[in-house]
Amino acid sequence: MVLTLLMGCTLVAAVYWGTGPSLRCEAPAHGPVRPGWSARTVVSNGRERCYHLYVPSDYDPAHPAPVVVSLHGFLSNPDSQAWISGWQQLAEQHGFLVAYPQGTSYPQRWNAGTTWNSGADDVQFLRDLLDDLNGVAAVDTSRVYVNGFSNGGGMAVRIACEVADRVAAIGTVAAAVTDLEKCAPARPVPVVAFHGTADPIVPYGGGEMQGDPWREGAMLTRGPNTFIGAEQWIARWAAGNGCEPAPQAIAPQGDVRGVRYTGCDQGADVVLYTVEDGGHTWPGGVAIPAVGKTSRDMAATEEMWQFFQQYRLEDQPPALSRLLGPH
């Protein structure tokens, strides 16, 4: 059944954006950033990698801006992630930069701990992307935030485990989290997560993915994908942040209920929003056919941004670009 759902998602994505590499990456921009859309490339671990960048119309290189990095899911690409999440619309309102990195292999994906791994060093890619962006834009390095959907959500968690020195907070939607045993963040990292109780691809309660396409679709023969339940990995993260063991309930908002772990080290709260009967979808975003309900009672993108604004890396002062203004 899940194989059918995944193939349905692939068809939908293909109709709108395609599931392969973004065409925009074939004509990357160079030099200082300009308002609007562009694609940029960076060499990471000897491989040319690409990310899409949205710069708001009021961008001023004399004033360092926050950065949001949003990671697409399995079978997806930066165009699809932008379309589903709409981060660029919020960036235009609030004056921050949005980067949509592109995964590798086909179907495109992230090396986030599942059996779908591409083998790419995506952790280093994130570091190299931030270095590249710092060289062409005025970036507030104390306010870099990472989020992701599905496989991209799992990658966001891995980034929090390994790049806590550069990321102030993370957010996830339907995160495919498989392993936290080796996770050792350099500091407590605040997390806000969203997950639907009826997610047919990454089960809310965890467990093995049924109808795994790697096994049933004869794409590759690998072991099963077994996910940690949303409540379980969030509780483990909160414990790692030194939070109080009993979370506080958040007042329900339509079909969304939530809990917040507080009393955490360095104020690094951990929040989980649960969408009742929600599918493998981005709350408040563009609905994806065949993978369940998309909540209209909460917008994950806006809620994440509100959460992110509470946090910054205190030891990372804003840095002006080395290339200020037009040349």
Image: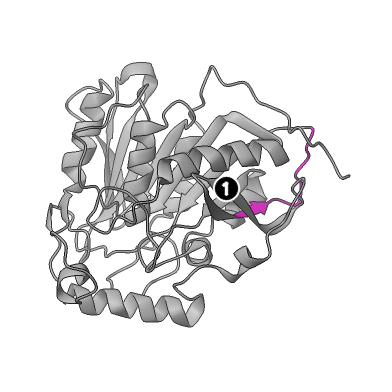
Residue drawn at (31%, 38%), measured in percent from left and top? 271
Q: Is residue 154 left or right of residue 25?
A: left
Placement of the N terminus among the 4 image quadrants = bottom left
Q: Nearer the viewer, residue 233 or 267?
A: 233
Residue drawn at (19%, 76%), measured in percent from left and top? 218
Q: Is residue 77 left or right of residue 212?
A: right
Q: Is 288 rendered above or below residue 234?
A: below
Place of residue 64 in the rendered image (x, y in percent of width and height, measured from the top left):
70, 33
Q: Nearer the viewer, residue 57 or 34?
A: 34
Place of residue 25 in the rendered image (x, y in percent of width and height, measured from the top left):
61, 63
Residue drawn at (21%, 26%), measured in percent from left and top? 239
The residue tagged 1 is 43
In terms of image quadrants, where is residue 215? Answer: bottom left
The residue segment tinted magenta is 52-62
Which residue is outermost to the front?
Answer: 46
Place of residue 27 in the rendered image (x, y in percent of width and height, measured from the top left):
68, 65
Place of residue 196 in the rendered image (x, y in percent of width and height, measured from the top left):
25, 58
In terms of image quadrants, where is residue 270? Answer: top left
The answer to whether one can see residue 137 in this image is: no
